[in-house]
Image: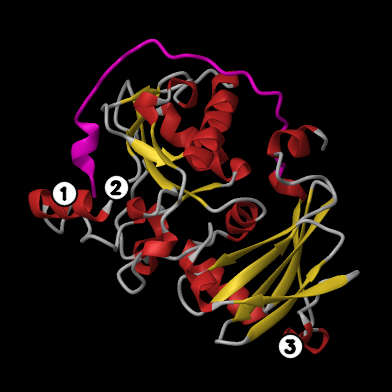
Amino acid sequence: MKKWGFLLILLLCLGLIFVNMEPFSESNVKIQNYDQSEIDIAEGGRISGNTQKIKVTEDQIYQGDLLLVNSEYPVHQESIKSDIVNLSANYELAQGYVLLGSDIYLSEDIAHKFSEMVAAAEKDGLQNFAITSGFRDFNQQSVLYQDMGSAYALPPGYSEHNLGLSLDVGSTQMKMADAPEGKWIEENAWKFGFILRYPKDKTAITGIQYEPWHIRYVGLPHSAIMEEKNFSLEEYLDFLKEQKSITTTINGEKYEISYYPVTKDTTIHVPSNLHWEISGNNMDGVIVTVFPRTTHTNLKEARTAE
């Protein structure tokens, strides 16, 4: 898909961002499955400590960073990130990489996270990253689908680019499949919450051929677990549904992740003294992630503290 975007080769001077960041170490990712007898979904899963009850609505199934979008599960209007911006018009967001086009859009939050990752890659001597495509609305996706056909594009609503969480990353030097930037992304993107959405060995599961340029944000600790277990997003969400609740320890910090099926009247327990967030899966439920006491909202601080 979207090989057309990489026929363009452009070499510009790249701005540089320096971030004091110590990435997560793969060897420190440990996953523990709860014994099923310990899990009581009706009572809020296996979340420890003081809890509070919250009501989860069906709309929340279609919101968050863990939404599965494929030929079976399309993008809902409420799934689209609300902070979409034109990167060309926001110079401060487009530092450390080249934009191959003047109309490349992306979630502002995801743009910041991508810049952090590019800054880390720069420390490893890589300075030739480019973004060839980011967010596309349904109309743009429709035009692309009509122009390129089903061999190179997905119909509107069935592409991750319609979310604002995905982007196509290239090298200004060569094809991503051959570029050092492509290898670095494949080995390191997970440390920053990104995944290679369509890996070489998962085509039968994702339904999409290998795309070394297409990355997707899912956030930590999810990207770390997916890397550890060699999961595609489809496999990871199935794993969470099967296990119901798991814990993972990354560099000594414990995370708790629980899956909840959602109906019209779903009430779950969340910790009242810890950080937590909810993401839908775009299918039938939500995933609650409980973070360590270190403030997870500032990933730079969280990583350097480890």
Q: Earlier in the sequence, mark 1 or mark 3?
A: 3
Residue 11, position in %: x, y? 31, 14
Residue 269 image-quadrant placement: bottom right
Label 2 element class: loop
Residue 29, position in %: x, y? 73, 53
Q: Which amino acid does label 1 sit on?
A: Leu
In the image, residue 21 above or below residue 262:
above
Residue 270, position in %: x, y? 77, 70
In the image, taking residue 260 as reference, residue 199 lies left or right, namely left
Residue 225 image-quadrant placement: bottom right
User: Could you tell me if the residues under marks 2 and 3 are in contact, i.e. CB atoms within 8 Å?
Assistant: no
Q: Which residue is labeled 2 in the image? A: 136
Q: Distance between the Cα atoms at labels 1 and 2? A: 10 Å
Label 3 element class: helix
Q: For residue 42, which numbered disc appears in the image?
A: 3
Q: Predominant secondary structure in magenta?
A: loop
Q: Which residue is labeled 1 in the image? A: 144
Quarter of the figure with the C terminus: top right
Q: Does the magenta stretch include residue 23?
A: yes
Residue sitting at x 22%, y 52%:
141
Name the foreground residue: 77 vs 29.
77
User: Could you tell me if the residues under marks 1 and 2 are in contact, i.e. CB atoms within 8 Å?
Assistant: yes
Q: Which amino acid does label 3 sit on?
A: Ala
Q: Distance between the Cα atoms at labels 1 and 3? A: 45 Å
